[in-house]
Amino acid sequence: MLASIATFALTGVDSREVTVEVDVRRGLPAFTVVGLPDTGVREARERVRAALLNSGLEFPLQRITANLAPASMRKAGTGFDLALAVGVLVASGQVPAGAPDRTAVCGELSLGGVLRPVRGALAGALGARAAGYERLVVAVENAEEAALAGGLEVLPVPSLTRLVGLLRGRWRPDPPATRPATQPGSSPLPDLADVRGQQDAKRALEIAAAGGHNLLMVGPPGAGKTMTARRLPGILPPPSFDEALEITRIRGAAGLGDGRLARERPFRAPHHTTSPQGLVGGGPVPRPGEITLAHRGVLFLDEIAEFSRAALESLRQPLEDGVVEIIRGQRSLAFPSRAMLVAACNPCPCARGAADCRCNEVDRLRYARRLSGPLLDRIDLICEVQPPPAAELVARVGAAERSAAVRDRVVAARERQARRLAGDEALCNGHMDGRATRRHAVLGARGTERLLGSVEAGTLTGRGHDRVLRLARTIADLAGRERIVAGDVEEALGYRLVSPVEIAA
Amino acid sequence: MTGACDACLRRGYLVGRLAARIAAMLDRPGKRVGALLSLPEEELVEAVADRSAGDPAALLRGFEAARARAEMADRQVRALCRHDGRYPPQLLQLQDAPAVLFVSGAGDLGLLAHDSSVAVVGTRRPSPYGREVAQDLGRGLGAAGVPVVSGLALGIDAEVHRGCLAADGLAVAVLACGPDVAYPRTNRRLYERVREHGLVVSELPPGQRPYRWSFPARNRIMAGLARITVVVEAADPSGSLITTQFATQLGRAVGAVPGQVTSRVAAGTNNLLKDGAAVVTGPEDLLDELFGSQSDEGRAARTRAAAGAIDDPVQLRLLEAVEASLGIDGICAHAGVPVREARAGLSRLERSGHVRRDPLGGYRRTAVPC
């Protein structure tokens, strides 16, 4: 007899429908799986056999052939266990043939017949919903995440025995328990108020958050660059529901989630030894890289000068396009990668700080040049992070502004931008191209004079010009002004990046 | 329009045409460029000509003054020969004074004959300190109205010119190539600015590339033009020290800026000081040397040097803080302003040339606090 069961396999951060066809007929007992299974999938045979037998079910001593369709796609992982088991049960007549109607199943099996969770439950559920399934059977641990998809009934099933009960119409699971999503107020995110001093870095962080500008932090080791950067997700606007879903889906696909809806934006800080593949994703079975894990959030590159040139180069396109394309054989995968970049580095190669620095100008220039190039072109803003003076360290706790207050200003500035940029490609000032910048960042006479003055004084090149305009636009937005005033331009000039090329000229 | 007679012009072009041969000649040991350049034309040709180069006399005959003048007009280069009244008389003290100076730029030709110009030179790889002092000297002297002579090289020379231009001073760049050639390429924007506001001078005719010998030759012209030659930072040995040797031979004053004793680029200057060079710690020292500390002229020059001072108290506090190399937060605390105003204020100081940005964001002072 033939059975056909739907399941969803994770490909990258999305899922793809796979139909598991199981044929059971007379012949020498054998269990064959075809349809480009990898070792993990082939091992499913042993798990399915043991799980069925240990659940008091029958494993037919007949010729079993399973096909994973589409047969041309490579299958990896353990998520096919449940579909195979159900297929065997249906094909051997142990459960009614029409029972899993409009139902997809997803899960790994233990030898004892217990259902184990798989990665990417939300991606699977979203796929199932899109494909028109009404029910999805998952392990209990996956239920909450899968239920976030909405629009289909998620059936949390603890074991194969229970599943048989369900299919025979003798048992109904409770709907998945939904724990309240973590609220922003009670969020475990670190607060900006914990950071002592660092006025410059805090201001730069606020501007960066408000305009979606990429940021470079410069300071000696131990000054608090990482600590400050970690506060960025807390001042970015909370993700919208769709964004939260995207974040949760990617987390789940990478096996990082806790099953709840993400209420905060991710913060990823890969080590500088991370390979290009680790940053943008890839591998024989393509997995999302750090930039995708930071999607809708923050990618923090500490010691950016220590990253390999190839690694930095690989980030350029994804940062620009918001998507990583990975091509494997005949198919290509798209990983979303719309993240803010925060980079950090030492002020000079000796990393000793201004007072005891022993580097000469050439050393410094060489160090700065190492950072330069394509990636630095994507950075609008540079700020300083200095170890705070002792007086700041003992200052009263709570004297500094809290993240929530900064976030309110950021949200207001973003709303202002959204109104202005409605219909444009860019969502925030940091994403405006040259043309949009010129249209939306119009300077008054005095601002223009300041900017031109700097161009003439040789401290600003044409390329730097647009960046300063974008920054000035954001600074005015933060102040709630449509008009960009001279002071905004001057502040923007203060935060701009001076490329080593400009210095040499 | 051109202040050069045909004979001198021919001499100038001859040096240009022989430049490559002079270079080949000087690769042999024991030859000095000064000895060559002081030879009369026939002997010069004789000295550097090699047998394979054909008839040396043809080189002398092949010169057409009209064509040279047309080419010069084309490239906006003027010439000044020693028979012109505006030719700097102090240069004639050189045994091998160039017969003709090729000049490019909008400045007044009479500027070269100014009797109190100062040459400021130094290493191509200065420390931040050296850069700061160099720009400081350029700015102070420029503001005081003293012509500032340097070589447009990377490092100290460039900073000197920058400082001088920032103060709207009289900038004179002496090149080791034709005056219409922006060398080194990195400094081409600076070259253009010197040409717009000052003078670019060379003994080589238009279009000539620099040779190894033409750098020390250029140094003798800088020393010859200036009443004082100052070295900001120089290793030992170095081209800058060659300039001071020329200055000493001419009996001109030599000054040096004291440097860190552990710094390689201060070895040359510190040795100069040991040998009796004047200690230079700022433009005032040079103005005192030029005009005397008591004279009216000296006082006026010092006042002019201090002009361009900042009157805004906040700006002044910002500048002090930058000078003390405080970080941005320290700068805010010192000036008593929020960080946004500090950043904006620093941008204004950067625009006015008082501070400079590091490639990685830090600020450095470039001017005298007044």
Image (cartoon, coloured by chain):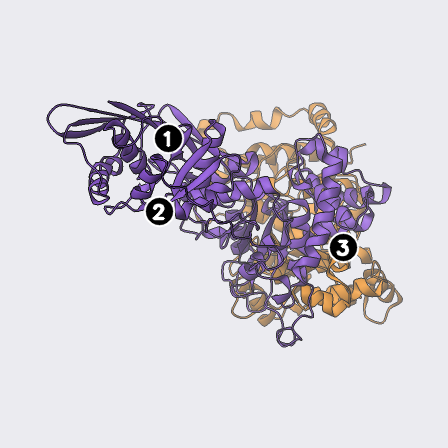
Chain colours: A purple, B orange
Quarter of the rendering containing residue A51? top left
How far is the residue under mark 3 from the one under mark 1? 68 Å
Q: Residue furthest front?
A: A170
Q: Secondary structure at mark 2?
A: loop
Read off the chain for label 1: A
Q: Does residue B32 appear in the picture of this structure?
A: no
Instruction: Kindly tell me whether residue B324 is visible in this rendering.
Output: yes
Looking at the rendered structure, the number of numbered marks drawn on it comes to 3
Quadrant location, the N terminus of chain A:
top left
Mark 3 residue type: Ala
Q: Give the residue at mark 3.
A: B344
Q: Which mark is residue A100?
A: 1
Q: Chain of mark 3?
A: B
Q: Residue at x 34, y 23 (%)?
A: A70
Q: CA distance from mark 1 to mark 2?
A: 17 Å
User: Answer yes or no: do the residues labelled 3 and 1 have beta carbons within 8 Å?
Assistant: no
Query: Of A443 and B144, which appears nearest the observer?
Result: A443
User: Is the residue at mark 1 from the same chain as the one at mark 2?
Assistant: yes
Q: Which residue is mark 2?
A: A158
Pointer 1 or 2: first along the chain: 1
Q: How would you rate the neighbour count of disc 2 (Cα within 10 Å): few for under 14, some for 14-19, many for 20 or more?
A: some
Near mark 3 (Cα within 10 A), the count class, few <14, some 14-19 or many ≥20, is many
Amino acid on which disc 1 is placed: Pro
| Marks 3 & 2 on one chain | no
Left/right of residue B37 with respect to residue B331 in the rendered view: left
Farthest residue to the left: give it. Answer: A28
| Residue A169 in picture, x, y percent from top left | 37, 36
On screen, residue A156 versus residue B49, left or right, reads left
Kind of residue indicated by mark 2 = Pro
Q: Measure the C-alpha gap from mark 3 to mark 2.
A: 63 Å
Q: In the rendering, at what x and y percent does residue A421 appear?
A: 72, 35
